[in-house]
Image: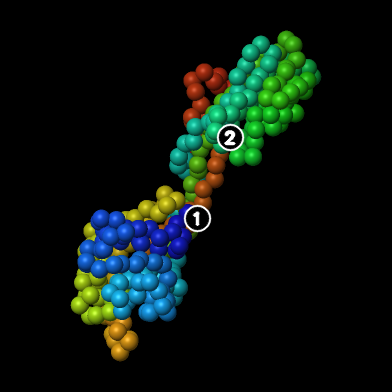
Amino acid sequence: MADISTISTTIAAALASALCPDGTAQAAATGRPLVIRRGNLTQADLGDAARTLQQGCDFITIADSAESWVRVDEPLGRPWRMDTTQPATAHMAISGDTATVTVDAGATPGGTVGLRVTGLPGVAGDACSLHVATAGDTAATIAAVIAAALPGAVASGADITLPAMTTVQAINAGTLAARCVARRQQQVFIITAWAATPAARDALGCAIADALALTDWLTDENGSTFRIEARATTNDDTAMNRGVFSRPARFLVTYDTDLTRVVPAMLAGGTGIGPDVVRGDVLVGTPAP
């Protein structure tokens, strides 16, 4: 989900990549040390830290403007859409009347496993037991949950013993990430260049403008894409008597608040399930649009 924090961090990373092509440990493209951070300039930056304005270090700060926030009313409809697929790391295998759960070595349990059983005592037709594996699961806990829903089934460790004269089918599927756009909004982010001289301030301000001139879209660490558009830029010399020169540049950001949920692949019309699984009353048909 895009958030003001992830947006600021993404902008900072984009500027660091453009202005520090040799790496953040080296001088910036302006030829001086550069610090890029969220928030605002601190007292330490003015004279109490290892790198300060007066020592020739430039700063870029990125802050969001609360007063600029506005909701964008669009008929989003809030549909849930499939996003990414996660392959299963938990698996179910059948040997005779015994089903065995395994988890890939060193992997976090994930995916959907289960059994489809015909011929259980007291059950007309097919019975089905499914479990979506989570990080806290083990092969034994998965087996116990699945066995508990099947009359006559007994779990012992990772093995499930089923009553004689039954027909058993293993169900193995990955999981899907479903995404829903809950809200769309716009907000101004202020990217400010700070330097100890007007010339250094102007050089850094121009470098920021050039770095984002052809950038219309950025994607944050969560995979959410937002639009960024340049707005007004001004010079601020009100602190010139203290040797502080700044240039705030305003950018309008349009971003979505989107929700992500993990769902079993078989709840999405069988997406991600191998061809060996038989379609029946366990698997649903094509998902509704």
The location of residue 15, given as percent across then percent down, is 30, 61
Which residue is outermost to the bottom?
Answer: 241
Q: Answer above or below: position of 91 versus 183.
A: above
N-terminal-most mark, 2 or 1: 2
Q: What kind of element bears circle 2?
A: loop
Q: What kind of element bears circle 1?
A: strand
Front one among 187 and 238? 238
User: Residue 24 lies in what quarter of the image?
Assistant: bottom left
The location of residue 94, given as percent across then percent down, is 62, 16
For disc 2, the marked residue is 109
Q: At 23% from the left edge and 58% from the top edge, which residue is drawn?
A: 214
Q: What residue type is labelled 2?
A: Pro
The location of residue 282, given as percent across then percent down, is 61, 26
For disc 1, the marked residue is 182
Q: Is residue 253 in view?
A: yes
User: Residue 144 lies in what quarter of the image?
Assistant: top right
Q: Answer above or below: position of 260 versus 231.
A: above
User: Is 29 displayed left or right of 163 in the figure?
Assistant: left
Q: At 72% from the left edge and 18% from the top edge, which residue is drawn?
A: 161
Q: Answer above or below: position of 72 versus 97.
A: below
Q: What residue type is labelled 1?
A: Ala
Q: Number of marks in the image?
A: 2
